[in-house]
Amino acid sequence: MTAFSIGSWSFHGLLKSGKINLFGYLESIKYRYRLQHADIWSGMLISTEEAYIQSIKETLREEQLTVASLAVDGADIWHADPDICEQRHQKALAYLDIARQWNVNTLRIDMGVQTAELSDEQLDFCVRRYREYAQIAHDHGFKVGPQTHQRASQVPQNLKKLHEAIGAPGFGIVLNVNRWVADHDFGDEEVAPMTAHVQFDRAFVDFNGPQLTHKIQLLRRAGYQGCWSLEFRGGANEYIEAEHDLLTLRRAVGQVVGATDVSP
């Protein structure tokens, strides 16, 4: 059955004002939006201490929620300073273990390259790290990879080279649909076959026209089987705006895959 979620970053305004936390987000996913899948941004976590991580695990189990994606800030692979690289590597390993404990579907760890150009040195380093992470992910039933929101990962050819060089089943892309700095017209189609998790954001996709349906169709043609998630960037009226976008996305996906196949 087709599944949906709302990225927890969609409520960053409420988080900043102290009006929501991770447990409130999970409650909203379950009871406000009647969904079964969470899309968690690490900025909502207050700690990575064992007791806190375990309490989230218990909540996920009690509420029968699946983590479609866990997006990690600050664990980026590449940095020119080897000491910073190692610090980030240790954070990535910690989150790989959290992903294992929570039985996530996808873990986002970014490349960390903030230019559109990806040097041979950067590519080789990222390939080695991702290959290591992908093996851990595959061993525990999930996928790991970058999200298309940093400069290097917004160039489809960079992602294609990365994917081909890694060649591991535990590697996948978190696709922010239509968010490219190069090859904009065919970026989504190029990356769709390697996409493990997808997010739609009205800042980049026209929710009011045929573009949304077209993007869903090309992902389906590429064999995408993951959760259909959304992200709202506005920072105000987040509960109602997210609900509006969820209804729009569900309607569009239903038109493509068939209404009887669409579930929470």
Image (cartoon, helix red, strand yellow):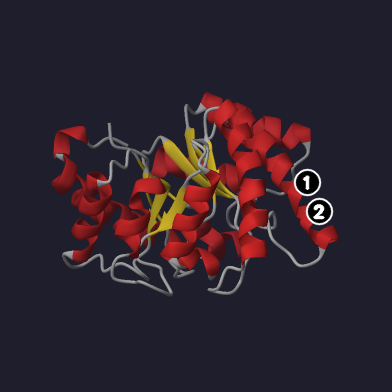
Viewer can see residue 220:
yes
Q: Residue at 66% across / 38% down in the picture?
A: 96
Q: Which quadrant would the N terminus be assigned to in this image? A: top left
The image position of residue 210, as x and y in percent, is 16, 64
Q: Quadrant of residue 157?
A: bottom left
Residue placed most toward the observer, 108 or 86: 86
The image position of residue 78, as x and y in percent, is 69, 60
Residue linked to disc 1: 90
Check residue 146 in the rendering and tell me which mark sits there, or answer none: none
Residue placed most toward the observer, 173 or 80: 80
**In the image, 226: left or right of 8?**
left
Dot 1 and dot 2 residues touching (CB under 8 Å): yes
Amino acid at the residue labelled 2: Gln
**In the image, 166: left or right of 255?**
right
For mark 2, does the 10 Å Cα neighbourhood hold few (<14), some (14 to 19), or many (20 or more) residues? some
Residue linked to disc 2: 87
Viewer can see residue 150:
no
Q: Quadrant of residue 183?
A: bottom left
Q: Residue at 61% across / 68% down in the picture?
A: 119
Q: Residue at 53% across / 49% down in the picture?
A: 165
Amino acid at the residue labelled 1: Gln
**In the image, 84: left or right of 156?**
right
The image position of residue 244, as x and y in percent, is 30, 58
Q: Secondary structure at mark 1?
A: helix
Q: Secondary structure at mark 2?
A: helix
Residue 138 vs 199, above or below: the answer is: above
Q: Which quadrant would the C terminus be assigned to in this image? A: top left
Q: CA distance from mark 1 to mark 2?
A: 5 Å
For mark 1, does the 10 Å Cα neighbourhood hold few (<14), some (14 to 19), or many (20 or more) residues? few
Residue 229 vs 102, above or below: the answer is: below
Q: Residue furthest right?
A: 83
